[in-house]
Amino acid sequence: MTNTYVAVDIGASSGRLMLSQLKDGKMSLKEMHRFTNGFSFKQGHDRWDIDHIIKEILLGLEKIKQAGYPDISLGIDTWAVDYVLVGKDGKKLEDPISYRDARTNTAIKDLTARVSKEKIYQKTGIQFLDFNTLYQLFKEDKDLLAKTDKIMMIPDYIGYVLTGKAVSEVTNASTTQMLSLREGLFDKNLLKEVNVKPEQFPKLVDAGTPLGKLDKSKFSKYDLPDTDLITVASHDTASAVVGSPGMGHHWAYLSSGTWSLIGTELNVPENGSKAFAENYTNEWGAYGTYRFLKNIMGLWMIQCVRREFNNKYSFSELAEKASTVKPFQQFIDVNDKRFENPKSMISEIKNYCRETGQQIPESPGEICMAIYSNLALFYAQQIQKLNDILGYKIDTLNIVGGGSNVALLNQLTATISGIDVYAGPDEATAIGNLTVQMITKGDILNVYLARRIISDSFDIKKYLPQEEKYHRIFEEYKEFMQKIHQKSN
Ligand code: LRH
């Protein structure tokens, strides 16, 4: 009998249930349910509505049963770093706070006054982002923490609600910045700094570990399929890396969604002084790998702009408008913290250009072209940094995720970085989630063969570098970035 696999893949702005089967060496993919996600301000913080997410998953599962799939395997992945505090009665103490909440604005500075950055990086190899779980817990309500029996990362919590089984899956746990690279466990001293005990985390498990059966008796309102849950690479970016086709020899990936995550897969972590200086991370990947990467602000900027135009234009209309505008008219540090959660992204971009004496983008097309141009420049610079840190040359960039559909951005990226770009699949995260389930169930032997199946099954487009004339612009951009950083240091 053919196995049926379902990926629950939830990002910051939407969630989906994707169904797949393997037939004749190809992986099918069908969207069964989609819903919106987002945080809203409640009880003093930006919070996720976790009950809404779980309800949508159950609705999706019901649709799947009704579509004729009574027996499925299921994996869950979501964004990283956020967590749910669970009390002794096994219930959440409150809705989880979003990593974009302002509570951690000064947290890195405050905590690293007690433990040095060097020490934290040496132990964990994880990049400094003020929303890492470490800093969120540092700013957590102490009374609430004292009442907490278990701290569960978002996908682990969803899996727990569905099955009653609690685990800490390692790809996501690594983004806490509290896992010790050397011991492979939560670092007791770091936990102590943030008033957390090791027993408050469920036991660590690798991606690919069976979790248990969906407890249908708990959800008798719904008509649900018989479901085996498998703990996949539950950090969405880890699933996206598994789901990358791996085209090229020394290939890098760019998981392009709300965030742009650019990097490469390593078998040994790289937490030396160059990686530290460039704030590169060693997030854990599936099957003993490390995701050596950097977070870039990404399409979040476009999402915010679109919202400010009252969703009047689709993403492809915005890209079309941008394509009529000349690229590289202004240099913007897209990773400036001011773009993390501004009141108005459009005003923030305009103010940035005003303050740096540059041309101010006005029309929707100009604003979007300014974002795309600067994302491409930032990506290209990171390829050079990867070459420098790793000591070899990345020859190919695999762009996956929703952003891989933006042809304009793919072409700018190939041209500025001077390497071949492969774009697709756009659903790499769901595909990576499904892949780990298929490997666990024995339908695919390993991740290398899986990547071949992925490149045979999905549409992947190639972009070659064009026009040399942009080389000078890239050099000017790097000088600009250097000056900006010198000023802020
Ligand atoms: C992308 C992502 C990224 C994290 C951020 C919180 O969805 O998981 O890898 O850094 O969200």
Image (cartoon, helix red, strand yellow):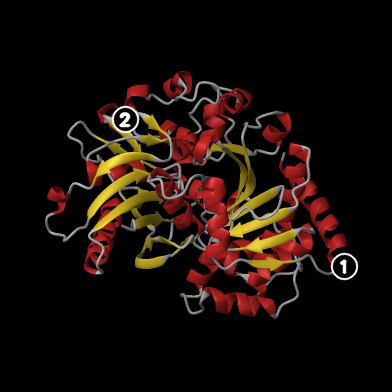
Does ligand 1 reach within 8 Å of label 2's beta carbon?
Answer: no
Which amino acid, by three-letter code, is at mark 2?
Leu
- Is residue 484 or residue 57 the one in the foreground? 57
x then y, percent, for residue 39: 38, 56
Q: Tell me if I can see residue 489 in this picture.
A: yes
Mark 1 or mark 2, whichever is nearer to me: 1
The residue that label 2 is drawn on is 145
Q: Secondary structure at mark 1?
A: helix
How many marks the image carries: the answer is: 2
x then y, percent, for residue 414: 74, 62
Looking at marks 1 and 2 on the same chain, the residue that comes earlier in the sequence is marked by 2
In the rendered structure, the answer to whether residue 264 lies left or right of residue 212 reads right
x then y, percent, for residue 239: 48, 49
The residue that label 1 is drawn on is 469
Which amino acid, by three-letter code, is at mark 1?
Lys
Q: Secondary structure at mark 2?
A: helix
Pick the quarter of the image with the N terminus. bottom left
Q: Tell me if I can see residue 363 in this picture.
A: no
In the rendered structure, the answer to whether residue 224 lies left or right of residue 370 reads left
x then y, percent, for residue 213: 23, 45
- Is residue 332 or residue 160 the one in the foreground? 160
Disc 1 from disc 2: Cα separation: 56 Å
Residue at position x 42%, y 20% in the image: 192
